[in-house]
Amino acid sequence: MNSIEKISPLKISDGVSRRTLLSGGLAGGFLLAFHLPVRAAINEPVQPPDVTDGKFAPNAFIRIDAEGVTTLVMPQVEMGQGIYTAISMILTEELDADWSKVTLQHAPANEQLYGNPIFVIQATGGSTSVRAFWKPLREAGASARAMLVQAAAAQWQVDPASCTTSKGEVAHKESGRTLPYGALAQAASSLTPPKDIQLKDPKDFVYIGQPLKRLDTPDKVNGKAIYGIDAMLPDMKFATLAQSPVFGGKVGKVDDSAAKKIPGVQKIVVLDDLVAVVGDHMWAAKKGLDALKIEWNEGPNAKINSKAVWDDLRAASEKDGVVAKSTGDIAKGLASGEKFEASFELPFLAHATMEPLNATVHCKSDSCEIWTGTQIMARVQSEAAKAAGLPVEKVIVNNHLLGGGFGRKLEPDMVVAAVRIARQVDGPVKVVWTREEDIQHDIYRPVYRDTIAASLSGGKIVGWKYKISGAAILARWLPPAFEKGIDIDAVDSAVDVPYDIPNFHVEYVRAEPPAIPTGFWRGVGANNNVFAVECFMDELARKAGKDPVEFRRGMLANRPRFLSVLNLAAEKANWGQPLPARVGRGVCLQPSFGSFIATVVEAEVDEQGEIKLRRVTSVVDTGIAVNPDTIMAQVEGGLIFGLTAALYGEVTIDKGRVQQSNFHDYRMLRIDQAPKIEVHVVKSGEAPGGIGETGTTAGPPALRNAIYAVTGVPLRRLPIDRSLLAAGKKA
Amino acid sequence: MATTLTINGEPKSFGAPPDMPLLWVLRDILGMTGTKFGCGIAQCGACTVHIDGKPVRSCVLPVGAVRDRNVTTIEGVGASAAGAKVQKAWLDLEVIQCGYCQSGQIMSAAALLASTPNPDDSDIDAAMAGNICRCGTYVRIREAIKQAATGRQS
């Protein structure tokens, strides 16, 4: 029976931290993608395993005990994307373990052991997990398997090459002998990992490529799964907090006389920028918070509103940017055909993970222990240590399943706030944000403005000048990745459009909105660029007098993987076949996250401009599909996430405050509005691509293009403004 | 003041103010964390439980209003035929992603099947539109409800 241990018993101080990675494991070629310095620690040579209790622990990811229990340590966090299952499949494949006996553990905070090779920090995001860990996990599994084989061969005094492995056993066919991995654990633990690791030929894969059942879901149907918000400790108190409604504001006067009278309220914690009420349960804490009279020193940001944000961004977007890519001769290209221009704008967005932000913290004089669900284990540990005034090794972080991440939990602020509160509380305290606090104190997907100039000649694009203006999230979040004024996330899917365009030029203007914190949001930079590029493609197709799919095909002669998914999506979506009145199809083709995806949305726009999503078809070539069912699920869900933003998503600012607060005014797409979705996963032998964010980037432009097909209105802002779409409106 | 409620068929006694929403009694006093907090204003359905078999948003239900009616939570819904069928269909069709909303989804779906054994699409829309899933599992939720209703195997 598979299980996920509820709260990781692996602590920073145990043997795990003293072992290091397989040689060459995490220092794979992926780093080159981001041009980051490889830290010496990651290149340390293999050290012999130091476990002496008979447990075989050849690397950071695999533990096999004498009973054969195989524990896999998860270097990436599970927030719904199915990565625990995918990681386990990759390890199990090369280890030849028994899938039915695999047990999973959340990894502890340890950047050296569990750092994501693409980011070089212990982070889960950017649709990188399988791409980043594909090779190191295969090598970890294969290396461990070779050691178990070597141990068996030594015992039997046979050539290791004459042994085979399957389902947690080594076999010697000639003599008919077998030994389970558990019986070999002790002997294998004294062996040195092989220098040359033999990986399986993909044609011999047993698990990879199969739609195996997820390992995390059985406990999610019966209430047993434990998320960060479910942490329960003896003598725990419960708290909720209020931060300044104006960004950057400070606490002024607090009148707590009414709050203190509420039964169950234990303590009011007043810090310079937040107030928390600690109680016997969340209800007491919440009632206590509502009863507080807090005067805030709002500061200069109280003047900020959405109009000012957009005025600033539009002004910034008029400037020249830093050149991110330039091929051919853009001036000549733009002059050599009929020229068209447009600009596209995307709003601030909140993440609204279903699990509101939370962290449970127990601060003692010389240590601090944290229970939460985060996408950045080690950074949470180090930021918590700073907030607690402790050395980092005195902070233990217990990670949990995440009730959604979407980039929000790539930030440590909710943990830092909880630590600061917990320092004022005796014993453990669970700090849970209300939904209102969660929406109004998010770290928002930034506003973006993209300007495009393109020229058409002979039905093709001959010049393409594209300029992105928006925040540089990487400059704050991963400074080494921000080089020469270019945020490589902000230009993702803009510098690598699917199409052959002879004169091609991309610029980036860093434009930070005032006071409003910005961060990663599912789909990251690609969200912005795929939207603008694919919307304008449809406008250009119309100018060229061509069908949108045909127009794109004309620029894909040298792009077989793109052409193939586009053709299949068109076929599966019945592209070109008749539709009822006021129903249209729109297409999107995107290069994002190392995958090749074509999507067709079929939507109806009624006489009033209301939109009904009818059907979405996506075709995905993501290379080797580790678990095809998970990939389908991620695209299905990602599409809904993106379509939700296109239809409803906008955070607006007035008087320095976020105007939305909960699901009544920050709306979500619901089941009665959800379209039929078909996802087709193309069989491929190429290296795996990323998948978790691809549907999110695909949905909005494909929907917008369907609306364009019906109405002729070229929407250039999200969320979709229905008032522009009512019958009789002209483009 | 001690209150006693019947939860998943068992009596549970605890002290709580009568205006305290059932959600926080379940989670913070009784430690039954399967029922989730999502919005606090009955907009998302993550906190759905059954009161005498009917789906109710426990985040806005004062515990004092429950009285002698039976409370069923995600921890106990598998004991009913409809609940067990829904749980099985959810796993067979691999509905779940992050899973945080799914306690509420399963409670709403189980109540639907108990009252409407063969729901059509509009029945499903009406019963499930109060449950938000941020991971976007709606397509599979719809399919799983139909499978649970017919007993068809995937």
Image (spheres, rainbow, N blue to C red):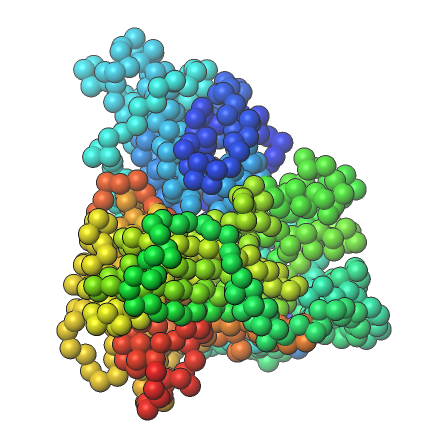
Q: Is residue A683 above or below residue B50?
A: above
Quadrant in the rendering for residue A64: top left
Is B129 displayed left or right of A36 in the figure? Answer: left
Closest to the observer, B92 or A547 = A547
- Residue positioned 44% across, 72% down in the render: A718
Quadrant location of the N terminus of chain A in the rendered image: top left
Vertical placement of residue A223 versus A5, above or below: below
Q: Locate residue A14 relative to residue A498 in the image: left or right.
A: right
Residue A63 appearing in the image: no
The residue positioned farthest toward the bottom in the image shown: A728
| Residue drawn at (23%, 69%) of the image | A544
Residue found at x 26% / y 50%: A621
The location of residue A456, given as percent across then percent down, is: 27, 65
Quick check: A41 above or below A481?
A: above
Q: Is residue A82 left or right of residue B70?
A: left
Which of the two residues, A190 or A673, is positioned nearer the viewer here? A673
Q: Position of residue B98 (x, y in %)?
A: 44, 57
Q: Residue at x 27, y 80 (%)?
A: A710
Drawn side of residue A301 relative to residue A40, left or right: right
* Residue A399 coordinates in the image, percent (x, y): 56, 46
